[in-house]
Image (cartoon, helix red, strand yellow):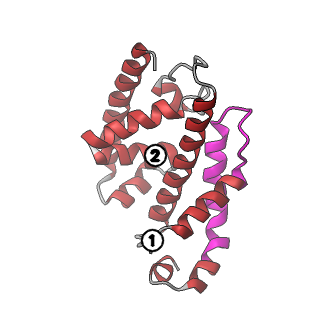
Amino acid sequence: MLHAWSLGDERALEQLMPIVYADLHRLARRYMAQEPLDHTLQATALVNEACVRLLDSSQPSWQDKAHFLAVCARMMRRILVDAARSRKAVKRGSGVSALQLEEALAGVGNPGKDLIAIDDALTALATVDPRKSQVVELRFFAGLSAKETAEVLKVSEETVLRDWKLAKSWLRRELKKELSRGV
């Protein structure tokens, strides 16, 4: 169905959405669990916004379901980062400190407040090593396993695990730099 949709078959999209909706909602709930309690966006609204952006994008070319979910996870991340940047602009000077990466990657603390710092560090990593950035995005944000990440990136599972370890170290160092600069 993903391939048929890539070729412009609207019926395939209608058949696909009920099938992938549960997976998208699971991703959205995972993201929303990391957001501050006062966040106004709900998981269903996040899924809907991601779907709208997905439908507004150019003709997609999906490799498989894991690739589709990875792209959706990236869209959800962008939506939440945009919302966090808007909140930060409104609350300029609120004194929010940068979250340590190990807390964020372990799902501890409140990464929603620090999503901007994590996103900035991940963007910096992408300029240095795009694959390691993709590994973090797929494993942490999309919730894919090492095996699923390897399939999406077309590398071995060992490569994913090595990239995951190195990326966490690199990002941890970057977040510490931001914290010392007072970002």
Where is residue 124 shown, x and y percent of the image? Answer: 33, 36
Which mark is nearer the camera, 1 or 2? 1
Where is residue 118 shown, x and y percent of the image? Answer: 46, 33
Residue hosting label 1: 58
> Position of 56 compared to 22: left or right?
left
Which of the pair 61/155 is nearer the observer? 61
> Position of 21 compared to 74: left or right?
right
Would you place residue 46 above or below residue 12 in this image?
above
What span is colored magenta in the figure? 16-44
Residue hosting label 2: 139
> Position of 56 compared to 63: left or right?
right
- Whether residue 148 is in magenta: the answer is no
- Quarter assignment of residue 19: bottom right
Would you place residue 14 above or below residue 35 in this image?
below
Q: CA distance from mark 1 to mark 2?
A: 25 Å
Q: Callout 2: helix, strand or loop?
A: helix
- Whether residue 17 is in magenta: the answer is yes
Q: Main secondary structure of the magenta part?
A: helix
Would you place residue 94 above or below residue 40 in this image?
above
Three-letter code for the amino acid on which mark 2 is drawn = Arg
Instruction: Tell me which residue sits at (37%, 30%) in the image.
Output: 171
Q: Callout 1: helix, strand or loop?
A: loop
Instruction: Tell me which residue sits at (61%, 44%) in the image.
Output: 31
Where is residue 16 shown, x and y percent of the image? Answer: 60, 75
